[in-house]
Image (tube, rainbow, N blue to C red):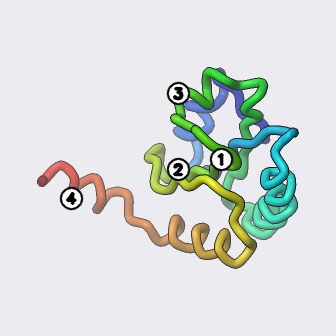
Amino acid sequence: MDLTAETFEQTVLDNDIVFVDFWASWCGPCRMFAPVYEAAAEANDDIVFASVNTEEEQQLSSAARVSSIPTLMAFKKGTLVFSQAGALPAPALDQVIAAVRDFDVEAARAESTEG
């Protein structure tokens, strides 16, 4: 799923877990990460795997504070829970997916309001 400035927020809010890959066609590491990302999407059909072409969506990339690509972000229940630049190997991406699935957003929100 390709995201744009118009569809980004609604996609993040309407789905339980959303991974977003910020990439560009000229980026070598982005092209190396693409098949890993696609395989993860096929293996986890209950999660939304989206991508943002940073060349076409420069304002969105800027608003998301993406300074290098590829950058992978994960949102759970509308909250950013992971953001990292660089292409991940498949085992590391699987670990991130598992961690995001297990992450308790409500507990983290409660903890942050207590501080």
Disc nearest the viewer among 3 and 2: 3
Residue picked out by circle 2 = 75
N-terminal-most mark, 4 or 1: 1
Residue, x 65% and y 74% (percent of image)?
A: 92
N-terminal-most mark, 1 or 2: 1
Distance of label 4 from label 2 (alpha carbons): 18 Å
Q: Please, what is the three-letter code of the amino acid marked with disc 4? A: Glu
Residue, x 12% and y 53% (percent of image)?
A: 115
Quadrant of the rendering where the N terminus is positioned: top right
Residue, x 66% and y 57% (percent of image)?
A: 86
Residue 113, compared with residue 44, is above or below; it is above
Residue picked out by circle 3 = 63
Using a 10 Å C-alpha cutoff, classify the residue at mark 2 as few (fewer than 14 neighbours), some (14 to 19) or many (20 or more). many
Q: Pointer 4 and pointer 1: residues touching (CB < 8 Å)?
A: no
N-terminal-most mark, 3 or 1: 1
Q: Which mark is residue 94?
A: none
Residue picked out by circle 4 = 111
Distance of label 4 from label 1 (alpha carbons): 26 Å
Residue picked out by circle 1 = 20
Left/right of residue 16 with respect to residue 5 in the rendered view: left
Distance of label 3 from label 1 (alpha carbons): 14 Å
